[in-house]
Image (cartoon, rainbow, N blue to C red):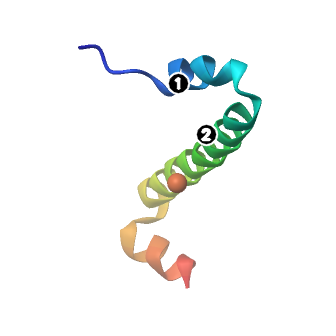
Amino acid sequence: MKRKSAKDIVGEAREDFTTYDLLKEYYQDEEEDMYWGEEQLDLIGMIGKGNQLVKQL
Ligand SMILES: [Fe+2]
């Protein structure tokens, strides 16, 4: 059985406006989390893990 993508799930909820709005907001938030994670990985690549951790304090 093929696993559904986030896009498929949001698409199926298009008829249900409340669910659609909730899912859209949820995935937008997750997208921001993903960008934050990518930024941290780039930062670790540039300044090292120890310095990245100090920067979080
Ligand atoms: Fe998240």
Q: Where residue 26 appears, x then y in whole percent?
A: 63, 45
- The quarter of the rendered structure image containing the C terminus is bottom right
Q: Nearer the viewer, residue 16 or 6?
A: 16
Q: Nearer the viewer, residue 9 or 48?
A: 9
Q: Nearer the viewer, residue 14 or 39?
A: 14
Tell me: residue 29, above or below residue 2: below
Tell me: residue 17, above or below residue 51: above
Mark 2 neighbour density, 10 Å: few (under 14) some (14–19) many (20 or more): some
Q: Is mark 1 within 8 Å of ligand 1?
A: no
Label 2 secondary element: helix
- Give the mark nearest the N terminus, 1 or 2: 1
- Answer with left or right where residue 11 lies relative to residue 21: left
- Answer with left or right where residue 29 lies relative to residue 50: right
Q: Residue at x 64, y 48 (%)?
A: 32
Mark 1 neighbour density, 10 Å: few (under 14) some (14–19) many (20 or more): few
Report the disc number at residue 9. 1
Tell me: residue 53, above or below residue 21: below
Residue of label 2: 27
- Give amino acid for label 1: Ile
- Give amino acid for label 2: Tyr
Q: Where residue 48 appears, x then y in whole percent?
A: 40, 65
Q: Residue at x 70, y 26 (%)?
A: 16
Query: Picture quarter containing residue 45?
Result: bottom left
- The quarter of the rendered structure image containing the N terminus is top left
Work out which residue is located at the far top of the displayed protein and give it.
1
Q: Residue at x 69, y 20 (%)?
A: 14
Work out which residue is located at the far left of the displayed protein and give it.
1
Label 1 secondary element: helix
Front disc: 1 or 2: 1
Cα distance in 3D space between marks 1 and 2? 11 Å
